[in-house]
């Protein structure tokens, strides 16, 4: 036993290192190969070129929207509310103490300066994506029919499971009566 | 597939030739013919066979529906109406498939409640049981994907709500959501991939069912006493005894199934799903299919998005932990006087959560859902470990045979030759 | 045990108080009507469907499309059962846009049995523009796409034969057509372009009252007398039955096949039960998992 074991014992440190390296390198190579193979499968599920191209900015004419009215438009397949705030709604919203909000945001942060009466927000509840119904709930804003979240007149979450305010899409005013959604910096 | 040696002896030369090359006849023989079955199984043990029949029914009707269905945002709804109106017996295929999903869940819930009541999840059947939980998860995914395919209002908003649930997962949630959508919202790419996955998953279910049956035939079946087979007198061969009982129960179940298909085909569905998908309007009362309602109630009981999602998934995952949470030495709740009370409270809570899931998330309903959710988890995390430690079980019968005939009495003939019945492992 | 009961009591109390607090203001539920198509053996009344089609054609079709119904469907068994020639004549009354022809132009031709019932507007946007911003919905599936919640625990028995109730959709449509009130309750302000309806959710509906007594002249019986009264109630029953047929055109075939299938399965189950009993008698019969020793030891 001892005589047969001796040569292998002697060769052991050197042989193991070389063999371990070989195994490791081969294994790592196989993993890299598998990941490279998997990548096209995963990437193919991401939004495709045509879907991305269809997301070009849209222009919304504001002149027919009367005070208090909410208009639904679609950009990139997503619903967007364009709301013409009334004077009372603006006063009430400015008076809300920011500290009491679960996702604090001032009135000024929700609209674009100089166009205080226009609110542009995504129209899907930040909880699970339902469309909140306008002019409902206790905060002059929206109430979600699915799980009871309520938003105020400038789309800030005031009640229910929604974690954040209705997000503001990138948009910019083109004069006083036209807004281009999908262009310009997000507010 | 089976741990025990087969008693199958090929008779003809051809059979011998074949068996020595692929011993599949012996496999089937040992698994479905000679397999020893406890002789005291009640009708709750027929739901396994019923579930196999439902899976087969869903796969066959699904494959045939796919011959006519078009997975696209513009044509899906139209093609379903085409199936309903113009395809010969298309209405039958579609109503079988739609109601079949509900029947599948009725059967699986009966199967699961039986398992929980009689302690079938306990050692040595933990792996068998976890495979069952995996099948249940795959069923839920398949049912959800399938419900989106008609592309009605409930389909669309169900898809929206569920994909938004996934977005609550920290860090990777948004990426997963985007990969599921294939766009910036639920749309045409979404329905296409949902169809593909809906077609794939049932075959994965079938694969796990094979493992589930395999594991069953290693440990043997539990029974209403929870005590193992001890002698040949405790068991009967699977065929003809269990086979004929399973066939009888399956036919009765299919008569019930037929009632829904032919006479109440839309009762278990939602009227809103006969309105084509409209991304601008959410239906006033959006609720999932009845079989998801308890989980939906749990989701809404939590006033926090991530918390609700964790609890909802936790409600399924916790099932898989039952074998280790239950400390009782006795399996069957028949012999557990205290646990049995809690079990029925648990069942009541499940039904209560189901009912609350269909109600608007307001006031008293939310409070009731919170209490029921608390009990749902407490049943697993508190009741199962503690009751097992403190409860004094009733005396168990000496054998399965004794439980059937009463102590001391004997029946004339035994179902199994003693050698055959001794074969299945009776450990645990 | 005590803890169990306390928990049950707490859950029940929460449930009951919650229910009481939430007794929702449904307004009036649509009254329950009798329909020929309800129940296990219900079928459509051909004459009623033909009258219903007439109401659709003369009134509803001015605003509402019927995109899933083809003229040929009107001749199908179990439906209005018009003859082939009647259907051809009905279809030919309409001009249908077709094409492009060999020259690449669209053209108009008389309708054929294979055409769908013509829509009043070319697309949803045109329909919305012509109707105050909201497109009138397609009516093909209306009887299955509308319902109302009865509340309570009725859902536990409503699916049962004979005592069940699953005609909420038709009842709602019938109630809606009869639910217009010229003098709405005092506390309700009806906005411009809106109309008060007792059964519409929220009560303010964009559709003006579509039907009134004597509006549609039905074909008379051989003796010159009307077959059915020409009243709003009768019109709304007829159009509702017609809409149920357009939503579920194979209802008759479904029920006929279903009763046979269920009887067959029950008979087969009966036979199997006795086969099973015979098989199990070899091993002293089955106990169905009853636990005799449990009953003895209490």
Image (cartoon, coloured by chain):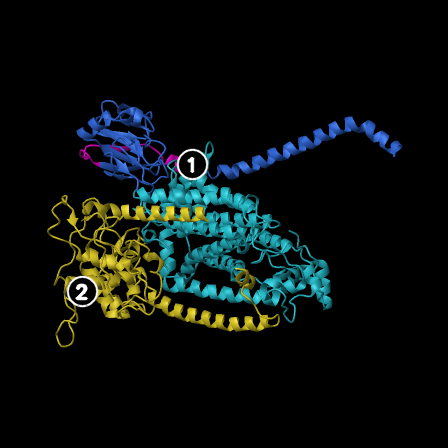
Chain colours: A blue, B cyan, C yellow
Q: In this rendered view, identify the residue nearer to me: C55 or C263.
A: C263
Compared to B349, does B57 lie above or below? below
Establish if B188 lies above or below B399. Answer: above
Q: Are marks 2 and 1 on the same chain?
A: no
Image coords of residue A160 (percent x, y): 33, 36
* Vertical comparison of A175 with C91: above or below: above
Residue A52 belongs to the span the image colors magenta: yes
Which chain is mark 1 on?
Answer: B
**Left or right: B407 in relation to B104:** right
Say if residue B161 shows up in the picture: no
Local secondary structure at mark 1: helix
Q: Is residue C129 left or right of residue C277?
A: left
Image point (16%, 52%), residue name: C208
Q: Residue B266 colored magenta?
A: no
Q: Is residue A106 above or below residue C125?
A: above
Q: Which residues are magenta?
A: A47-69
Q: Which residue is mark 2?
A: C234
Residue located at (72% from left, 65% from top):
B9
**Which mark identifies residue B307?**
1
Quadrant in which residue A162 is drawn: top left
Q: Considering the image in quadrants, where does the C terminus of chain A appear?
A: top left
């Amino acid at each position: 036993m001892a005589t047969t074991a001796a040569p292998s014992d002697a060769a052991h440190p050197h042989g193991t290192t070389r063999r371990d390296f070989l195994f490791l390198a081969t294994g790592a190579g196989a993993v890299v190969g598998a990941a490279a193979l998997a990548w096209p499968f995963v990437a193919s599920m991401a939004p495709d070129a045509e879907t991305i191209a269809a997301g070009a900015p849209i222009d919304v004419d504001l002149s027919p929207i009367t005070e208090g009215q909410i208009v639904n438009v679609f950009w990139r397949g997503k619903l967007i509310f364009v709301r013409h705030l009334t004077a009372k709604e603006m006063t009430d919203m400015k008076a809300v103490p920011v500290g009491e909000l679960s996702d604090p945001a001032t009135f000024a942060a929700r609209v674009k300066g100089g166009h205080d009466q226009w609110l542009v927000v995504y129209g899907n509840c930040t909880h699970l994506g339902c469309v909140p119904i306008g002019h409902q709930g206790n905060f002059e804003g929206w109430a979600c029919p699915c799980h009871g979240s309520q938003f105020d007149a400038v789309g800030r979450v005031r009640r229910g499971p929604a974690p954040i305010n209705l997000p503001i899409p990138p948009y910019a005013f083109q004069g006083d009566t036209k807004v281009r959604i999908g262009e310009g910096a997000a507010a | 597939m089976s741990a025990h040696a087969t008693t199958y002896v090929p008779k003809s030369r051809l059979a011998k030739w074949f068996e020595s090359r692929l011993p599949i006849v012996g496999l089937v023989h040992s698994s479905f013919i000679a397999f020893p079955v406890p002789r005291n199984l009640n009708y709750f043990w027929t739901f396994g066979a019923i579930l196999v029949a439902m899976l087969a029914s869903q796969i066959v009707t699904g494959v045939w529906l796919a011959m006519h269905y078009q997975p696209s945002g513009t044509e899906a709804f139209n093609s379903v109406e085409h199936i309903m109106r113009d395809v010969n017996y298309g209405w039958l295929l579609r109503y079988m498939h739609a109601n079949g999903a509900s029947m599948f869940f009725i059967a699986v819930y009966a199967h699961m409640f039986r398992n929980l009541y009689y302690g079938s999840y306990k050692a040595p059947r933990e792996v068998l049981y976890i495979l069952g939980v995996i099948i249940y998860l795959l069923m839920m995914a398949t049912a959800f994907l399938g419900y989106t395919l008609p592309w009605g209002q409930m389909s669309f908003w169900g898809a929206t709500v569920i994909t938004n649930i996934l977005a609550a997962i920290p860090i990777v949630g948004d990426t997963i959501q985007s990969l599921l959508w294939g766009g910036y919202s639920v749309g045409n790419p979404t329905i296409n991939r949902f169809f593909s996955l809906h077609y794939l998953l049932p075959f994965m279910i079938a694969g796990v069912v094979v493992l589930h049956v395999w594991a069953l035939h290693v440990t043997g079946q539990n029974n209403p006493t929870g005590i193992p087979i001890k002698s040949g007198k405790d068991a009967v061969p699977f065929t003809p005894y269990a086979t004929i009982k399973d066939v009888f129960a399956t036919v009765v179940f299919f008569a019930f199934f037929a009632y829904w298909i032919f006479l109440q085909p839309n009762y278990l569905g939602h009227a809103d799903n006969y309105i084509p998908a409209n991304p601008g309007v959410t239906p006033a009362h959006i609720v999932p299919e009845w079989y998801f309602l308890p989980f939906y109630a749990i989701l809404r009981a939590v006033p926090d998005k991530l918390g609700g999602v964790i609890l909802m998934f936790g409600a399924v995952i916790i099932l898989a932990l039952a074998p280790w949470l239950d400390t009782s030495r006795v399996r069957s709740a028949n012999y557990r006087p205290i646990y049995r009370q809690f079990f029925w409270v648990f069942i009541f809570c499940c039904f209560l959560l189901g009912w609350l899931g269909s109600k608007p998330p307001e006031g008293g309903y939310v409070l009731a859902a919170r209490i029921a959710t608390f009990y749902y988890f407490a049943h697993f995390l508190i009741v199962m470990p503690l009751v097992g430690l403190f409860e004094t079980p009733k005396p168990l019968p000496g054998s399965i045979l004794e439980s059937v005939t009463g102590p001391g009495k004997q029946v004339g003939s035994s179902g199994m030759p003693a050698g055959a019945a001794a074969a299945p492992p009776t450990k645990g | 045990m005590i803890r169990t009961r306390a928990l049950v009591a707490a859950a029940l109390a929460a449930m009951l108080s919650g229910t009481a607090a939430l007794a929702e203001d449904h307004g009036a539920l649509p009254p329950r009507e009798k329909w020929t198509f309800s129940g296990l053996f219900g079928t459509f009344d051909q004459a009623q469907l033909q009258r219903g089609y007439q109401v659709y054609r003369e009134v509803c079709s001015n605003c509402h499309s019927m995109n899933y119904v083809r003229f040929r469907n009107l001749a199908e068994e179990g439906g209005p059962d018009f003859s082939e020639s009647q259907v051809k004549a009905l279809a030919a009354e309409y001009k249908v846009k077709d094409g492009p022809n060999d020259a690449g132009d669209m053209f108009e031709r008389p309708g054929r049995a294979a055409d769908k019932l013509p829509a009043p507007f070319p697309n949803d946007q045109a329909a919305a523009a012509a109707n105050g911003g909201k497109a009138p919905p397609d009516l093909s599936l209306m009887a299955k796409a509308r319902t109302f919640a009865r509340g309570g625990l009725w859902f536990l028995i409503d699916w049962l034969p004979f005592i069940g109730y699953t005609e909420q959709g038709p009842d709602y449509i019938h109630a809606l057509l009869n639910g217009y009130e010229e003098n709405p309750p005092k506390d309700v302000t009806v906005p411009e372009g809106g109309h008060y309806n007792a059964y519409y959710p929220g009560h303010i509906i964009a559709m003006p009252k579509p039907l009134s007594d004597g509006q549609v002249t039905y074909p008379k019986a051989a003796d010159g007398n009307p077959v059915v009264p020409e009243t709003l109630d009768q019109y709304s029953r007829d159009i509702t039955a017609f809409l149920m047929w357009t939503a579920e055109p194979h209802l008759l075939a479904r029920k006929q096949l279903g009763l046979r299938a269920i009887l067959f399965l029950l008979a087969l189950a009966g036979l199997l039960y006795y086969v099973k009993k015979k098989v199990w008698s070899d091993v002293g019969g089955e106990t169905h998992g009853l636990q005799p020793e449990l009953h003895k030891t209490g």
